[in-house]
Image: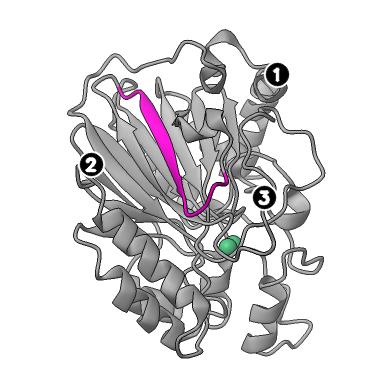
Amino acid sequence: MKRITRREFLGMSLKTGAATMFAGMFAPSATSLMGLGGVAQATTKTISPFTFAVITDSHLYDIPDHKFDAILEKAVADVNGLRPQPDFVLYSGDLAQFGKEAEFVKGKRILDKLKVPYKIIPGEHDWYLDMGKAWRKMFGDEYWSFDHKGTHIIGMNSILVDDFWTLRELTPAERMGYMAELECHQCGLWGVHDKQLDWLEKDIKNLSPDTPVIIMTHSPLWDYYPRWNFQTIDAPEIRLLLRKFEKVMAIHGHIHQVVYNSIGNIRSAGLLSTSWPWPYPPVELPYPHIKMNRVDPGDFEDGLGTHAIDLAKNFDGVLNYRAFSDLLPDNVKRGVKL
Ligand SMILES: [Fe+2]
Ligand SMILES: [Fe+2]
């Protein structure tokens, strides 16, 4: 008898829930209209309120005194200046540009100036020169979880692709070059793959449904614009595993822009980079009013920034985009409810 894989099983389960999720993406329900000032869905469990900060997508080059070094320094100083201080900082991938050890050494030297602990996940630019070897040596496991003041926080590596390089006989540097393209037709769609799905299933198994959960991935856990890997191929499986929770917050790097979406129990937000802003892809957004302004090409800090996320006792969250320029429309400037 053919063994049913976990992906096939989840796929079958997903078919029954697909209509609901599809509707969730494009027809916001009353409880998913938080960004529009709707009623926030809180968990029944209370937590000790706290703030955490997020920095991402620094794309450091192995070039002395490159301009992106100074911007990451500025981001670290900005977070260190937050009052009250965040409890911790999350970094959402693409610390390096070409996955070189020297780029990580430089990045870690700057990030180590943070006054509070930080946790980091990889982006595609960190990974494909040596398949994560230097990144792991520097930062440890690429997927992890921890508990903080009643909240469960998860980081996952969402940039895994199937082998496209062996048959093409690509060198490691060529493989990295392909993956560094925004639109790589040879590379395929990214995901977390089965090993991490198994890990996630075990990680959350004993958590009660009222546990507040935060999940960080490099790419979005929804289909935003797959051509640029503004997606995670096994996000439906992740959403299915997380469906038991009353409320989940998801944050992601990679897209270098303000964006918001809500599917079922998951509120999802994109993050500003400290390198360059990507343009918005040519698709309709489910929440088109939660966007940043068009970036001024004459101001090389426009479109960049950091983030502080304030969590209330009932796990209502506010994402404060801390743009380095006058980038944000008023509704985003006031903070996006998560
Ligand atoms: Fe990036
Ligand atoms: Fe990326």
Q: Which residue is mark 1?
A: 23
Within the magenta stretch, is there residue 323?
yes
Looking at the picture, tell me which residue is in the foreground, 82 or 246: 82
Ligand 2 occupies quarter: bottom right
| Left or right side of 27 for 317 | left
Looking at the picture, tell me which residue is in the foreground, 276 or 281: 276
CB under 8 Å between discs 1 and 3? no
Q: Which residue is mark 2?
A: 147
Disc 1: CA contacts within 10 A as few (<14), some (14-19) or many (>=20): few
Residue at x-position 40% and y-position 24%? 245
**Image location (x, y in percent) of residue 259:** 60, 39
Residue at x-position 57% and y-position 80%? 98
Q: Which residue is mark 3?
A: 230
Ligand 2 under 8 Å from disc 3 Cβ: no
Residue at x-position 60% and y-position 31%? 261
| Amino acid marked by disc 3 | Phe
Residue at x-position 33% and y-position 48%? 53
**What SS does tag 1 mark?**
helix
Disc 2: CA contacts within 10 A as few (<14), some (14-19) or many (>=20): few
- Label 2 vs 3, first from the N-terminus: 2
Q: Is residue 165 visible to the viewer in this orientation of the structure? A: yes
Asked if residue 31 is positioned above or below residue 207 in the image, the reply reads above
Asked if residue 120 is positioned above or below residue 147 in the image, the reply reads below
Give the magenta part as a residue range: 315-327
C-alpha separation, residue under disc 2 versus residue under disc 1: 32 Å
| Amino acid marked by disc 2 | Asp
C-alpha separation, residue under disc 1 versus residue under disc 3: 20 Å
Asked if residue 146 is positioned above or below residue 165 in the image, the reply reads above
Name the image quarter holding residue 55: bottom left
Give the tally of numbered discs: 3
Asked if residue 310 is positioned above or below residue 176 in the image, the reply reads above
